[in-house]
């Protein structure tokens, strides 16, 4: 199809999509008056995995959250301080794009969103490689771009941007908090290993964990950390080698995580070794009571079973479960958090602009150093010169189908100061004082088994 024909089709289809979205928003809000006076819509490109192996564990929950949040915001159903409809009264229209495929394809898709579809902003990307590829385009095309899911700290370490933001924390937080939890709960630790995919994100996660645990536990022995081809599904050699370690680190996800647990059980890995899953939230939600006792789990932030008991979290959790009949996993929380961050920045910029529609420049200025509330709690855009978020995080231990001994760690303890690289900080300044985290919580969080509701019981 020629470029001219594609452009003509987009010009024809986009107004129709806008009209459909506006009509749906008006019906949901039940207010003809708002529809009659509404300003032009805000168009948001949303990019996440809709096909391939990353779709089920990451892409679909993120897409679901985007659909839920945009519909609820347009209807004015989100609790305060987000109860104003849309973005400052303007309805939101979503343009959804599949993240599957090579990074070159994502670069092309990003350009299409901005240059052909003329979206007002892009929110997306699970893959760290894709985040790295599109990051320079945000400033080149001067379009607000918010990364919601990728974890590599390299985005803002050694680079700075005007129109690029990330509303989730990096893998540095995941890895250092995991090391703190292990050091605190296993004071006699002597041997550690790792089983991680041979992929940049997972290897970065292992490298940070290894450096952090060495700093916390001087003299700890690292037993031949194992790597494997992503999505290979067979881990017998890796399990055999790692079996001699007391702790086995893994940032594995999706079907690989489930296969590792099932094969680890059959090969008795967990009789002597504790598995540490830095991104294990979705896995334990899916496997439930099949997760071995003693497994240490994180959810890449204060999400899902680690989320605080706030009105915003309760609303998001219940609305998601009611609409999709499953528990929201951390990718859903991270997408919702990104959209609420954009709304906060947009409306702050709009207020400063005499309550008229803000420009890209004004919205970017408002976003810098912003603090806002997400379904996982407070988010501070305090790193990357005000473009990179930090949050508290938490880890817990699986015991008889419950998540127990939950410990929360403040961002200042798990994240380097602004302007300091993660590798240098872990090697020279991390845990300069003795390890400390939050006291074990007096609350046990029941692990939802294949979509069953999360419950809480005092211990």
Image: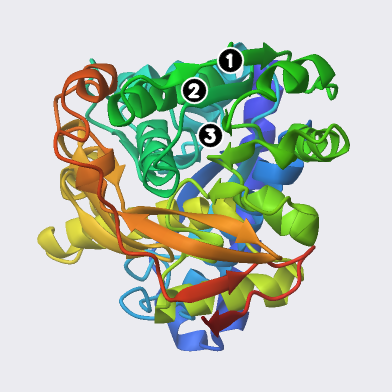
Report how far apart the C-alphas of labels 2 and 3 lie in the structure. Answer: 21 Å
Report how far apart the C-alphas of labels 1 and 3 lie in the structure. Answer: 28 Å
Say if 221 sits above or below 387 in the image. Answer: above
**Residue 69 on image: x %, y %:** 53, 65
Q: Give the left or right position of residue 341, taking residue 129 as reference.
A: left
Which of the 4 image quadrants contains residue 195? Answer: top right
Question: Residue drawn 64% across and 74% down?
Answer: 454
Which of the 4 image quadrants contains residue 197? Answer: top right
263 and 244: which is toward the camera: 244
Disc 3 crowd, CA 10 A, few/some/many (<14, 14-19, 20+): many
Q: Give the left or right position of residue 377, taking residue 402 as reference.
A: left
Q: Secondary structure at mark 2?
A: helix
Q: Secondary structure at mark 1?
A: loop
The residue at which mark 3 appears reads as 125
Disc 1 crowd, CA 10 A, few/some/many (<14, 14-19, 20+): some
The residue at which mark 2 appears reads as 206
Name which of mark 1 and mark 3 comes first in the sequence: 3
- Mark nearer the viewer, 2 or 3: 2
Name which of mark 1 and mark 2 comes first in the sequence: 2
- From where the camera sits, is residue 415 visible? yes
**Residue 415 on image: x %, y %:** 26, 37
Question: Residue drawn 46% across and 42% down?
Answer: 148
Q: Are marks 2 and 3 in contact (CB under 8 Å)?
A: no
311 and 165: which is toward the camera: 311
The residue at which mark 1 appears reads as 225
């Amino acid at each position: 199809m020629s470029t001219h024909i594609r452009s003509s089709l987009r010009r024809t289809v986009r107004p129709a999509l806008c009209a459909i979205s506006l009509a749906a928003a008006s019906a949901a809000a039940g207010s003809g008056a708002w529809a009659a006076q509404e300003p032009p819509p805000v168009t948001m490109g949303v990019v996440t995995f809709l096909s391939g192996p990353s779709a089920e564990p990451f892409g679909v929950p993120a897409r679901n959250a985007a659909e839920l949040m945009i519909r609820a915001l347009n209807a004015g159903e989100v609790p305060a301080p987000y109860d104003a409809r849309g973005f400052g009264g303007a309805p939101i229209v979503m343009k959804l794009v599949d993240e599957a495929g090579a990074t070159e394809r994502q670069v092309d898709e990003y350009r299409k969103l901005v240059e052909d579809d003329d979206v007002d902003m892009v929110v997306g990307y699970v893959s760290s490689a894709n985040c790295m590829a599109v990051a320079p385009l945000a400033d080149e095309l001067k379009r607000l771009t918010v990364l919601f899911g990728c974890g590599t700290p390299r985005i803002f370490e050694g680079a700075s941007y005007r129109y690029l933001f990330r509303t989730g924390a990096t893998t540095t937080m995941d890895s250092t908090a995991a090391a703190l939890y292990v050091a605190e709960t296993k004071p006699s630790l002597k041997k550690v290993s790792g089983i991680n995919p041979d992929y940049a994100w997972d290897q970065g996660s292992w490298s940070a964990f290894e450096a952090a645990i060495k700093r916390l536990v001087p003299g700890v022995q690292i037993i031949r950390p194992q790597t494997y081809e992503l999505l290979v599904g067979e881990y017998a050699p890796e399990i055999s080698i790692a079996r001699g370690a007391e702790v086995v680190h893994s940032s594995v996800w999706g079907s690989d995580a489930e296969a590792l647990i099932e094969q680890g059980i059959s090969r008795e890995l967990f009789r002597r070794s504790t598995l540490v899953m830095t991104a294990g939230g979705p896995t334990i939600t899916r496997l439930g009571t099949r997760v071995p006792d003693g497994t240490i789990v994180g959810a890449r932030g204060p999400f899902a079973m680690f989320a605080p008991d706030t009105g915003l979290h309760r609303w998001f959790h219940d609305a998601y479960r009611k609409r999709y009949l499953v528990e929201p996993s951390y990718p859903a929380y991270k997408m919702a958090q990104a959209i609420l961050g954009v709304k906060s920045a947009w409306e702050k910029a709009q207020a400063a602009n005499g309550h008229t529609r803000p420009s890209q420049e004004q919205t970017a200025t408002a976003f810098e150093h912003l603090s806002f509330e997400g379904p996982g709690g407070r988010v501070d855009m305090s790193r990357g010169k005000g473009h990179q978020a930090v949050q508290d995080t938490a880890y817990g231990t699986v015991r008889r189908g419950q998540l127990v001994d939950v410990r929360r760690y403040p961002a200042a303890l798990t994240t380097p100061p602004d302007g300091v690289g993660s590798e240098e900080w872990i090697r020279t300044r991390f845990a300069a004082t003795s390890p400390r985290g939050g006291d074990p919580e007096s609350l046990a969080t029941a692990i939802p088994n294949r979509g069953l509701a999360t419950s809480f019981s005092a211990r």
